[in-house]
Amino acid sequence: MIELISERFPYWATMLLLVIGLYAMLGKRSLLKKIIGLNIFQSAIILFFISGSMREGGSVPIIEGLHSGAHPHPEDFVNPLPHVLMLTAIVVGVAITGVALSFLVRIQREFGTLDESILLEEVRE
């Protein structure tokens, strides 16, 4: 059982982070906690993509020495596309977090709270 957990540790960590992030987004009333949950959820997805794209014994896809007659096999390389996409996802996530936090500052100044239920009552009136 321990071997199964240790072999698949990134996937277990991903599932744990997904559950924590989902709970924070759906179960909390504070908008700030919802944003933190969104960031945790995003980190879990990034961890999943990066851990799924890793290959034991793989190297970067830079082909050197073709003139020597050696022909590399594609399975010897790690696909860089998931890493590039996740780097882009990190940048987009930081931008979304910055915009969301600026909205929270504006909401706090306007309504005096970040509690979702109080804000819904204020908006309905």
Image: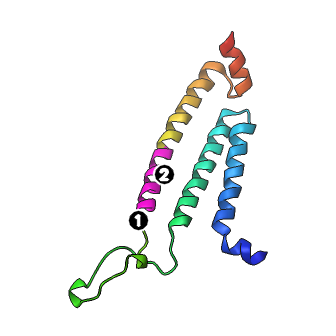
The residue positioned 59% from the left and 47% from the top of the image is 39
Identify residue type, mark 1: Pro
Residue 123 shown left or right of residue 28 in the figure:
left
Which mark identifies residue 90? 2
Q: Quadrant of the C terminus?
A: top right
On the image, the x and y values in percent for residue 87 come to: 44, 56
Residue 84 is one of the magenta-drawn residues? yes
The residue positioned 70% from the left and 74% from the top of the image is 6
On the image, the x and y values in percent for residue 85 come to: 43, 55
For residue 48, say whether it is visible.
yes
Q: Nearer the viewer, residue 72 or 33?
A: 72
Residue 119 falls in image quadrant: top right
Magenta stretch mostly in which secondary structure? helix
* Number of residue marks: 2
Residue 111 falls in image quadrant: top right
Q: Nearer the viewer, residue 47 or 76?
A: 76
Label 2 CA crowd tier, 10 Å (few <14, some 14–19, many 20+):
some
On the image, the x and y values in percent for residue 74 come to: 38, 76
Residue 85 shown left or right of residue 39 in the figure:
left
Q: Please state which of the two labelled residues, at mark 2 or mark 1, is closer to the viewer.
A: 1
Considering the numbered disc 1 on the image, is that residue within a helix, a strand or a loop?
A: loop
Q: Find the magenta span and give its range.
A: 81-94
Q: Which residue is mark 1?
A: 80
Residue projecting furthest to the top: 125
Above or below for 32 versus 55? above
